[in-house]
Image (tube, rainbow, N blue to C red):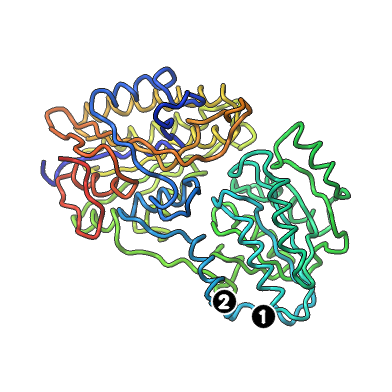
Amino acid sequence: MNATERTLLLIADGMGLPAPGALTRGAVSKESMPNLFRLFDRHGMARLGAAEDAVGLEQGQPGNSEAGHLIIGAGRRIPSLLRGIAESFEDGTWAQHPAWAALREHGRVHLVGLLSGAGVHGHVRNIIQAATLASRVLASSEIFVHAALDGVDSVAGSAPELLRELRAALEPLPRVRLATVMGRKWAMDRSGNLELSRHFAHSLCGRKERLAWSDEALKAHLGQASEASFPAHALVPEGAIQPGEPVLLTNHRADRTAQLAKVFSETSPVLSLVELGDAVPPERVFFPVRSSDRGLVSELKAQGIGLRRVAEQCKFPHVTFFLNGFHESLGEEAVCIPSIPEARIPEAPEMSLEPLTAAVLEGLKRPGERAMVANLANLDQVGHTGRMEAAVRAAGHVDRAIDTLQRTCAEHGWHLMITADHGNAEVMQAEDGSPWGSHTTNAVPLVVVPRPGASLELQELGGTLANVAPTFLATMGLAPPGWMAMSLLG
């Protein structure tokens, strides 16, 4: 090997591995992805930890795209922001943030967040902790909580249990009331369709119809659909957000919250846990991102090698912002492929894979291109629908794309690495046979397919996502730095 080697990393989003010995209940199998599994058989396959402490998350917490891409790009384990928020709550530093002072002049304050137990974009704990501090710090303010039910990252049907936890935690807090409950379908859009975000915001503001709350209404809805599409229900009608009243967004991940922040900022001052663009001034952000200047990208740049990125719009921040260690851009060439609307995904599980594959192929054929990362979004996006047949079709599309790209890599002298950022589509059914559309704690694969004439072999068949970056560097003939995890190559 030498520094003129060329490597493509494919991140098959949401392509976990079934647990050893478990019955196949998902779309990742030899039958649905024969080309991929042939590569496993021929070149070996490492099982990488992609959840819980392996990627800086808490015990029992499934992996997610942010943590996955962050760790892949860093080459080392980084503690999650969710864990950092909890520590800040416990040690009192969150309560001391100067942003609270700006809220004391308001008689009414609103907390809006995702009611989830998964911790991918938001967590029930974030809402409870923010409400606890607001009750304590804002001694004369009424505090209204507006919860967006999950059913996507959290298991569908888990909303009643999460609501019980939230209501029990809020009950003893002075001046805090749960005002509105609504599905995340409208709150978490990131397609650029502001009308979806406005529907959610206007419902919380009382400008759209809100139904009267009852436990029976939620139960009846869950008998037919996920809580993600639950229409707005008011528990405290007078708790609607009025113009000029501040809104604190309690989600801890930006990509599905920034659009909503933009809409709320049209009528209200907005505060947030994380940076959400121009909608939230820096002084109103409780936990600004701490970017990292060390990782795969910096090591390649030191050798004069640029890392080209290709992804659909829905995963574009993952191969740029997250892979870059929370830098918007590090000067990379990045190709963003338009995504289809999420509502179309069950009927079109191929999504935008064809133009994405074409963009990767174009890069592979460039004489001067040396390093590239591409995200294949299908198994995650389709996996979230909970529809087995659609997920199997998505797996077939991804498998054929992998075969096309592997052949072209061989033709043009590229090494190929294939991994995933977290599990999802390998489990599409719960043990009772009901649909499953959530992330998992399962391991993900790593396979290295050398260019013709090269000898690359995995020596370690275990590890975590932190091992991907050093292994990538090793395929290019570069020694990983000592602060990275080890390469899995011999």
Residue 159 x %, y %:
70, 45
**Callout 1 crowding tier (Cα within 10 Å): few <14, some 14–19, many ≥20:** few
Q: Earlier in the sequence, mark 1 or mark 2?
A: 1
Residue 124 vertical position relative to residue 176 in the rendered view, above or below: above
CB within 8 Å, label 1 to label 2: yes
Q: Report the amino acid beneath label 2.
A: Glu
Residue 446 vertical position relative to residue 388 in the rendered view, above or below: below
Residue 248 seen in render: yes
Q: Is residue 42 left or right of residue 234?
A: left
Residue 209 seen in render: no
Residue at image position (13%, 47%) is 3
**Callout 2 crowding tier (Cα within 10 Å): few <14, some 14–19, many ≥20:** few
Q: Secondary structure at mark 1?
A: helix
Name the one closer to the observer, 399 or 171: 171
Residue 317 x %, y %:
46, 51
Residue under numbered circle 1: 102
In the displayed orientation, state which residue is furthest to the top: 31
Residue under numbered circle 2: 283
Residue at image position (47%, 51%) is 59
